Amino acid sequence: QAHQNTQLKQVWEFSMDISFETPDFENIVGQLTTHDEESDLKLENLKRKLSLSEDDFEQLKITYLILDRSPNDVITLLKQSVLFQKLEQFDKAFETCEKILSCLPIIGMDADFNQDLKSWIYAQCGDCKFFQKKFVESIKYYDRGLEIKQSANLLKQKTISLVRLKKFSEAEEFTKILLEKNSDSPDILRLQARCLMYQEKYVESLNLFNKLLIIEPKNIEILEHIATIHIELEKYQDAIKYFDIILEINPELDVEIQVSKFLISEEDTENLD
């Protein structure tokens, strides 16, 4: 039991990078259940091969072969869901998570661990909907996970979903809860600063962005937000100062920055008339 729990934990902590594309995925998946010489390997050998492989498509093929023999193998289903999400096949990742949920009553795991696993699976479901930009649905699954376990990660993902839905006031309240648990988190501070900015609470937002700038003095996104807030506050020369700092960090933005500075100068001149 303890060994199985450790294996499951290792799978769901698998690092995901979903930044690359996967052309011809459907064609590849169509061949995954085709039996070849690998189909004669014993289940244990397949699992060993899965653990040793570093190729995503090979791993996915092996998961199909394992599940063909052992459909309720939760460890393999977890691995498969992570691989699908990594390969940006979010519908398939979601379907696999639903299979895992249906397997849990069958395999009869420790109750506490079962709850932790369910919470994680709902997080996976929420992430699948999030990456498909189905934010209302993503919140529904994050909430299901939160009903089981109060997880900072789940709450953070729910908050980001609310921001994407432009529910900035509600999102701001959740950032306060998150900061109670981790007051120095740059990610949460940035999220709260954005919520405040989108609600036109410019002074509060500026204070937070300035705090973040101390931590990340060359973060162009933060500098752009600060410049934008100064424009909203009609502090045009201050905005130009921050645009100049951005230009020093990345000279390739020259044209974009110069246009911004010109527009600011025009607006500043109009206010003097």
Image: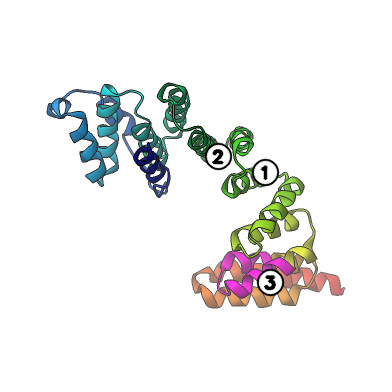
Figure quadrant of the C terminus: bottom right
Judging depth in this view, the residue of 36 and 229 nearest the camera is 36
Q: Where is residue 75 in the image (x, y as percent from the top left)?
A: 36, 35
Q: How far apart are marks 2 and 3 (CA)?
A: 30 Å
Check if residue 215 falls in the magenta segment.
yes
Nearest to N terminus: mark 3 or mark 1: 1
Check if residue 82 falls in the magenta segment.
no
Q: Name the residue under label 1.
A: 162
Q: Where is 258 relative to 147, above or below?
A: below
Judging depth in this view, the residue of 198 and 50 nearest the camera is 50
SS at circle 1: helix
Q: Position of residue 146 (x, y in %)?
A: 62, 39
Q: Where is 269 relative to 36, above or below?
A: below
| Number of numbered discs visible in the structure rendering | 3
Q: Dot 1: few (<14), some (14–19), or many (≥20) neighbours within 10 Å?
A: many
Q: How far apart are marks 1 and 2 (CA)?
A: 11 Å
Q: Which mark is drawn over residue 130?
A: 2
Q: Where is 24 relative to 180, above or below?
A: above
Nearest to N terminus: mark 2 or mark 3: 2
Give residue 194's quadrant in the image: bottom right
Which segment is the magenta one?
Answer: 207-226
